[in-house]
Image: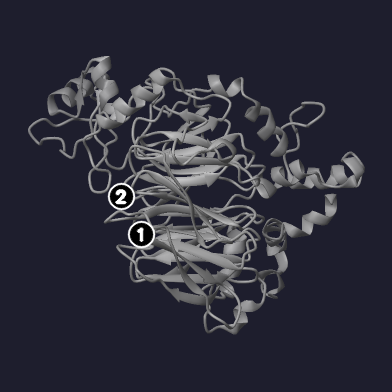
Amino acid sequence: MGLRNSRRRMSDSEPMDEESDLPSIIAYLIRSGQVRISSSDEALSEEDSGSEGEQPGTRDPTTGELTTDLSSLKSNFVLQDVKVKSGRFHPRTDERYNTKSLTELIQKREIGLSRHQKFTQGDLCVINSKFLPNRVRTVATYSQKAFCGTYSQDGNIFLSASQDQNIRVYKTDRSFKLLKTIRARDVGWSVLDTAFSPDGNYIIYSSWSDCIHLCNIYGDHEVHEALNLTPGEHSFCIFSLTFSSDNSEILCGANDGCLYVYDRESNQRTLRIESHDDDVNAVSFADDSSQILFSGADDGLCKVWDRRTLREDHPIAVGTFAGHTDGITYIDSKRDARYLLSNSKDQTIKLWDVRAFANEDTIRATKRAVSAQKWDYRWQQVPRRARKKRLLGDTSVMTYKGHCVLHTLIRCHFSPAFSTGQRYVYTGCATGSVIIYDLLTGAIVKKLDNHAACVRDVSWHPYYNKLVSTSWDGSLGLWEHRSSAAEEADSESEIPCQCDEDEESDIPERTRPSVLRGRRFGAMAKKVVVENSDLFKGLYD
């Protein structure tokens, strides 16, 4: 039996008294159209239709809950790796941590049950998992849509790009304060992607242009250089770009289906690879060696490239990941040259292992599924049968369902290694939410609702338990963990985050006298521990 939402009220001609039995109630609901009897196939199509306001995904017909296939994950190395690094299991005894509170962890450390009487990295991740972000403050508001937002590698700088053609750089080491504003050049539609250089001194950005642009963050002399990729196309766009780890090259993905590599030393494009049959929406380096490249495109495929064997005149990918039924919007590397995340218009995120590539049959099946899609995610709702069953031969390790990918190239990421052990996968959502999944179970552990429009980008601080959501409602939301007592304390002595003219905001939150008062001390002490993870570094270095 399938339930259909209805706004019709009970008719006055068919009153229902309080003594009516269950059969009478069911008979009335069937007559009124609020309940109908359907076949199992029809019920499945209803669940897959993704009506507005409902999270997409396959649901258990008995419980109505989202289900996830864990069979591939259970036999993969990532299961044990994430369990150990996030503190779920002891690396030597393979026993589950039984500690349930911060107090117990501190007690074990002090009496010597912890090795060297110090917190391990796993211990820190266990502690941080108890204080995931749950409250938001709006730290910036723009007049137009915000597209990109990311933390630097040290977390002291935040970079934001908006459709108003301004790129804003914020200092975040003590407060969220505007450092400088860069007026973007040669912008069509919007700035589409940004990236920090590894040394944190430069940024690059791209748009509908033959050039990407390089700008400095610090220094009295302003640098704003156009780096021409010479594509030879009439209408050209770079959807994704990133620096190599040695700061010598820039990798780009373009709307002509090609990968571009720009050499900063020779100041010219050195490589153009015909890689996909459609727009390349996302690129990434696999690790710090800068030899292995990942790419994801609108043809529904993710490809792996090895620079050591790559020829421009005859490009051959090392391998291909196939299993999505629609275009790829974003990819994120785990930075270990082994695992990759991909977000897709088929409303799923997939986790891939580079040791398990797809065969030719699966690649052809993916291309057929993508070409069969007749809807446009930019302005249409998800069609009824857009989310199909898993393709035969899909080699993905895990599939995450529950977020909505519409309107724009929504991004997904692994959570930071330092504070979470990469225990989570997090993504923006077209409904204005931030979704945090458990990487090993697929369960949604947090759904952060605040924005009035699509959240295109999300960035988790590399060391602290806080993240910034970038939304098409023109705002940046800073999410942190706040207890009810902490919120009450902040309301008594509020210091704004957006503080271009407020010098008082340079004072760290942990030094505010109003924070440490009476019965609120315990809750705020937890907040200080979580927000200042650098204090933990000396405990195990």
Q: Earlier in the sequence, mark 1 or mark 2?
A: 2
Amino acid beneath label 1: Trp
Amino acid beneath label 2: His
Instruction: Relative to 512, say whether 80 is above or below.
Output: above
Q: Is residue 307 left or right of residue 386?
A: right
- Quarter of the figure with the N terminus: top left
Residue closer to the observer: 264 or 223: 264
Please report the residue visible at 47 percent of the width from the left and 29 percent of the height from the top.
Answer: 320
x%, y% of residue 8?
A: 15, 38
SS at mark 1 in the image: loop
What's the distance in space between the residues labelled 1 and 2, CA to CA? Answer: 10 Å
Camera sees residue 272:
yes
Q: Marks 1 and 2: CB-CB under 8 Å?
A: yes
x%, y% of residue 462?
A: 63, 54
Residue closer to the observer: 239 or 531: 239
Q: Which residue is mark 1?
A: 472
Camera sees residue 62:
no
Instruction: Relative to 309, say whether 428 is above or below.
Output: below
Instruction: Relative to 279, say whether 164 is above or below.
Output: below
Q: Residues within 10 Å of mark 1 (few under 14, many from 20)?
A: many
Numbered tag placed on residue 41 in the rendering:
none
Numbered tag placed on residue 407 in the rendering:
2
Query: Dividing the picture into quarters, in which one does residue 511 lie?
Result: bottom right
SS at mark 2 in the image: loop
x%, y% of residue 123?
A: 76, 43
Q: Residues within 10 Å of mark 2 (few under 14, many from 20)?
A: some
Residue closer to the observer: 525 or 471: 471
Please report the residue visible at 23 percent of the width from the left and 30 percent of the height from the top.
Answer: 4
